[in-house]
Every structure is written in C-alpha cells, then in structure tokens.
Amino acid sequence: MDDLEFRRRILADPNDNSQEMITAKNASLTNRKLSDELLQLDAKLESTLKVDVPDDLADRILFHQSGQPEQNRNKTRFHLAIAASVAFVFGLFVGQFNSQIVPTSATSEIAQVAMDHVYTEAPFVDSIDESVSLRQVNAKLTPFGSELTDLPGHVYYVNHCGFGDKNALHMVMATENGKVTVFVVPEHSQKMSSFSDNSLEGVVMPIQNASLIVVGEKGQNVAPIAKSLESDLNWEI
Amino acid sequence: MGKFMIKQFFRKKKPDASVSVDMNKQRRYEALVRAWHRDLYRYAYWLCHDPHIAEDLVQETCLRAWRSLDSLQDDKAAKSWLITILRRENARRFERKQLDLVDIDDYAIADTKHQGAEMDVEQQILHKQIMKLAPEYREPLVLQVMAGFSGDEIAEILDLNRNTVMTRLFRARNQLKEQIEKQSERRGQQNGRS
C-alpha cells in the first residue's frame, strides 16, 4: 500500500483494522503517528458530537405519542376500557358475594343438613340419655384432631354420623338454655353465621379447618354456647 | 356454576389477542425510543444546529416510527431505520422552510448560546469546525463517529455508493485536521511573538 492510499483510507476510517491496514500502520513511524493522531481526533470528535440530550426527552416522546389520536390507539383504548369495565363490574360482584352471598350460601348448605339431621333423629335422640363420659366424647372427637378438657354439660348422646358426604360428630347436650344438638363437621366455613327455620335456630362457627354447628330450639340463644364450646376445644394440630 | 361461567368468560376472551398485540407494540416502541432517542437527537442536532428543532424532528420521527412500526422486521435494523425516517423528516422541514423564508443564521446563534457554557475551549473550537464542514461531509462523519455506522451502512442510509462515502469521510477529516493545524500554528506564532 503506498502512502497516498494509506492516507486516504486512514482518514476515511481511523478504526479500519483490516489486516492490510494494520500492516500499513506499522510499516513506518509516520504512518503510526498519523494513525494515533487520527484516533485522538476521533475521540475528541466523538465527545464533541455527543451533545447533551435533554434528560426527559424519551418520556416526552412517549407522552407525545400516547396523546396522538390514531386508529390503532383507539382500538387499544376501547379494549382497555372494556377490560376495565368488566373488571369493575366483576369487582362489585365479588364484593357483594363476599359480604352476603358466599357465607350464607356456603354455610346454609351445612346448616340445612344440620337441621335435617336434628329433625330425622329427634324421635330417636329425644328419649335417649346415655350420660356420656368425657372419655367417650374425646374418643369421638379424635378424628377431628380435637378434644375437650371438661364436659361442657350433661351429654345425652354422642356418635359419628353421615353429614352430607362427610362424617361428622353428632352430640346432644344440656345447657343452661336447654337441650342443644352440636355438630363438628370437617368442612371449612368462612365466618360465623346464624340460621333458623320455623322451629329451629342455630349457628355455624369456623374452628380450625372444621365447622362447629350448634342447633337449638327457636328463640334459644345458641351463639354463646357455640363460643364456650369453641374455647373448651383443644386442638392437637 | 358461577365459577364455571366466569371461567368460560375468560376462556372466550383469550383468543382475542389484539389487546396483547397492542401492548407488545407499545412495549417494543418504548424500548426503541429509550434505546435510540439520544442518537436520534444528536444526529438531528448536527443536521439542523438547533436544539429545539432537533427535538421536534425526533418527536416527528418517533411518531412516524410508531405508525409504521410493523414494517420494521428486525429490531437490529432499528437504528438505521430510524435515522432514515429522521432524514426524510428533515428534508420535509426544508421544503416547508423554503416557504417560511427563515434566516438560517438565526439557528447558528441559537446553537452557540445553547452549547457554549458546558464545553471547554478545545471542544468549542472543534464544535465550530464541525459546523463549518459542508453538510455532505458532516453527515457521514456524524453517522460514523457518533452513531458508529460502517461505511456500507452509511452508504445505504445516504443512498450513495460506498466509495463516495469513504471519499467524503476522508475530506471531512482532512479539512478538520488542516484547520486544527492552522489554528495551532497561529497560536504558536502568537506565543513566539509575545
């Protein structure tokens, strides 16, 4: 490569690192010097060419674009609006469910089963008094991972029973307010709720992963019974 | 039952992917803007010598890029694609400006005011010298040094053949080099006298 050719190429691109240019750069001291000088010039050029860019330019560009009325854009907005509306209505709906429908609908099912039980077993249970001991009650409570420290009152009857598709504890006991039927159902309920029909009244109370149901006669205050029972139950788990 | 209906509702919604496509486009656009707005702005600045016009040019460029983003197949080509759009926008500006009859000297004044404060003397001189280059020499130089394009890429952007580009780059540096040498000679003489 002659000097003129080298000069032409090094000035056009000082970073040309092709094999022939590397050889030419090292061919003479003059070439080496010119190459270094031009690399220096390029470094200065680069820092001069890179003028300050406004800090928030990117954001301004993006903001500008988002304000543009454009077909595609409208479509996006339309979809977003629909999605937002659906989400909003859905949110309202779920809110309603949470405050009302879910507890009553979920627990009313257990409550209904409990009341059915009381009705069907009433003729049999009413006349029975087995004077059940604490040990017997606790034996029946074992599958639920729970036991009582003391008998909450006179227990007439205790047994397991089919409760819907589950097995529950069925216990008839005496309280200050009269006879009640207690169920421990291995089904989770969300929060305490009460139920009643023409002749029965009861509460469903969540305990651990199960539900404690106390059913008494209409007008009987069963909530305090459920609460004291709950505090008497010791959970192993 | 209720749960089932809700599931159905969302299942039905899923195949309609236009929302997610639009979101993808938005994300892609944002990534492009964030990656290249600095180069675009600087390039625009060296085309028009004015920070405000440079910003307008970048805004216009990005807007056009958004509208035709689908035509950009490969994101690796994004930079030269954007530069090409910007050059077109600048050309449009000149068409408009011929009607406006704006005095170009105004911009030169605006420019020195804007940049003067932050630069050291050497850079200020170099800045002026770059501005003094003819646009056809300055433009490939900016593309090469600031944006890092190769001779072939510059040739494609400027729609010239590669030899022409290399010749212009040679002349651009040659002029700058001569001016710098002249300047240091002058300074040397002054120092010699005093």
Image (spheres, coloured by chain):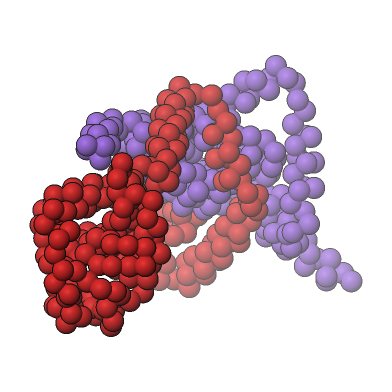
Chain colours: A red, B purple
Instruction: Tell me where residue A213 appears, x and y as whole percent.
Output: 28, 59
- Name the spot of residue A71 as percent of width and height, x first: 45, 22
Which residue is depicted at the point 34% across and 55% down?
A: A203
Question: Which residue appears at 30% of the width and 75% of the height?
Answer: A152
Please tell me which residue is depicted at 47% across the width and 70% down the height of the picture: A32
Position of residue A93 measured from the top left corner of the image (x, y, whole percent): 40, 37
B24 displayed left or right of B50 = left
Q: Residue at x 44, y 60 (%)?
A: A15
| Figure quadrant of the N terminus of chain B | top left
Can you give x and y, in whole percent of width and height, for residue B103 in the image? 77, 28
Q: Nearer the viewer, residue B94 or A115?
A: A115
Q: Up-down: is B143 above or below A176?
A: above
A46 or B190: which is nearer to us?
A46
Position of B90 with respect to A172 (left or right) is right
Q: In which quarter of the image is the C terminus of chain B?
A: bottom right
Res A223 → quadrant? bottom left
